[in-house]
Amino acid sequence: MLSWVGLAVIVGVVAAACDPEEETGDAALAERGEEALIEYGCLSCHAIDDLPGPQGGVGPPLDGIAERRVIAGELPNTRENLAAWIANPQEIDPGNVMPDVGVSDDDAEAIAEYLQSLD
């Protein structure tokens, strides 16, 4: 039989798993990622329909990137791989057309979070 203390622990664990602050943290990171994407000039080569202003067509459009199976033509599409690609594309695939633009690891994580939020 489950004690009141045991029940309280289970309820606490379930509540923590559904914590709205956790979602807010991800949303805040994605918002920071959107800002960083614009600041680093990613739209010079890529397009995202929901963002205003001129956008490039050299690189692939980034709308729906979360639904793609691979990124950079070879990496499984995970947030970690996407962040690594954004931070160091020439290290991952030397000679590819995406330049290293000096994206910090923290900004790459934020940009990856934003891109993974795009449907």
Image (cartoon, grey):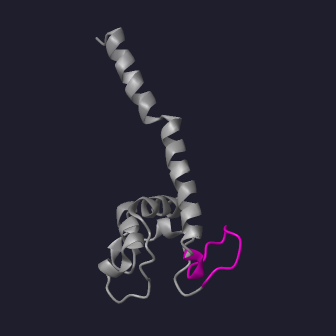
Residue that appears at 48% across and 67% down: 67
Residue 57 is situated, as x and y percent measured from the top left of the image, at 59, 86
Residue 94 is situated, as x and y percent measured from the top left of the image, at 31, 86
Q: Quadrant of residue 99?
A: bottom left
Task: Evaluate whether residue 95 shows in this view.
Answer: yes
Instruction: Give the answer, above or below, for where 7 lies relative to 84.
Output: above
Instruction: Give the answer, above or below, for where 60 lies relative to 113.
Output: below
93 or 64, nearer to the observer: 93
User: Looking at the image, which residue sits at the far right?
Assistant: 53
Instruction: Give the answer, above or below, for where 4 lies relative to 46.
Output: above
Q: Taking 117 as reference, is 70 left or right? A: left
Q: Principal SS element in the magenta part?
A: loop
Q: Quadrant of residue 3?
A: top left
Q: Which quadrant would the C terminus be assigned to in this image?
A: bottom right
Instruction: Give the answer, above or below, for where 55 lies relative to 20.
Output: below
Residue 85 located within the stretch drawn in magenta: no
Residue that appears at 66% across and 72% down: 49
Residue range (magenta): 42-56
Residue 53 located within the stretch drawn in magenta: yes
Residue that appears at 43% across and 60% down: 109
Q: Which quadrant would the N terminus be assigned to in this image?
A: top left
Residue that appears at 48% across and 65% down: 66
